[in-house]
Image (cartoon, rainbow, N blue to C red):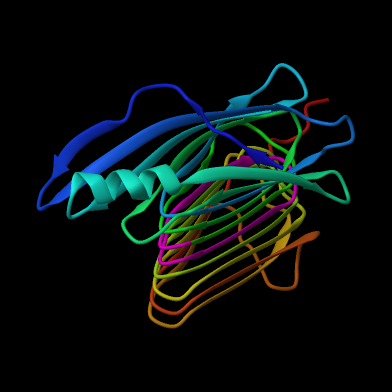
Amino acid sequence: MKLIALLLSALVLSSCGALETATRLANLNEVLVPQTRSLRLVNTNGNITITGLTARNNINIDADFFAHADSIEEAQQLVDAIDITWDYTPGGVVVVVVTGVAENCGAHLSVQIPEDFNIDIRNENGNVDVVPLVGAVSLRTVNGDLVVNSHSKVRAKSTNGHIIYQGNSRDFDLRTSNGNIDVSLSEPFDGSGSLATTNGSLRIKSSSIIDAKVAGDTVNGDYLIYGPSLFPDQGTGLIRLATVNGDINITHVKAPDTVE
């Protein structure tokens, strides 16, 4: 099925240095079939932000299409060719794809999804920002940063970008090249976590105790732990950290003694 984008405003034409710019706003608002539990979103050239949760079982996407070209006419042709398609796959997944993207054009997307939805985002040349708490998360981007907030399973991979994770997932795997990874935990951690980068620092900050075996490896950097000692062979959970050119810093606090 293909959505004919609802135009929200007239075409805006402006100058962008030596190139001309055309933009167009569109909206997808679809009531989902009851068994839908996941969103797969594919985009090239643009940022994606999961901004909030919908009140019902529907998905809402506000799209800002853009194109740059030598002439206004060419830019308009490029931006008019961009569209949003959607369909269902087995397993309760709605698949949304931005199509018609060429060089010097793309789409910025603002997305609202149902509560506890799982998301699988595949993006190129843009950032991905997951603001509300969502279900299981799988994020992949090239040339962009990832920001995610989740208490469920998290998988995030970037090429040439930073990763920021906040939440209390007991199962996260964060990987990037040429970027830092920052993790913030607000509850005691005894699960499985993995952080890896090539050129960047790894930082974990927890307001509670980390009860996990911790194996940290850096080639050209410092490995520092602030708080109770952590060891590769002691602890309930397991955290692996590896970087080539960067520091590893872990900060956590000891759990308070029980008061009788």
Q: Is residue 101 visible?
A: yes
Q: Is residue 253 left or right of residue 39?
A: left
Residue ID at (78%, 30%): 32
Q: Nearer the viewer, residue 25 or 91?
A: 25
Which residue is painted at 40% across and 68% down in the image?
200
Question: Is residue 148 in the magenta section?
Answer: yes
In the picture, residue 156 is in which quadrant? bottom right
Left or right position of 111 against 238: left
Can see residue 166? Answer: no
**Is the magenta region chiefly helix, strand or loop?**
strand
Quadrant containing the C terminus in the rendered view: top right
Quadrant position of the N terminus in the picture: top right
Where is residue 80, by image quadrant?
Answer: top left
Residue 150 x %, y %: 66, 40
Q: Position of residue 35 (x, y in %)?
A: 89, 35
Magenta-tinted stretch: 142-161
Tell me residue 95's x, y (percent).
70, 47
Given residues 5 and 250, the one toward you in this image is: 5
On screen, residue 22 versus residue 164, left or right, reads: left
Q: Residue furthest top?
A: 55
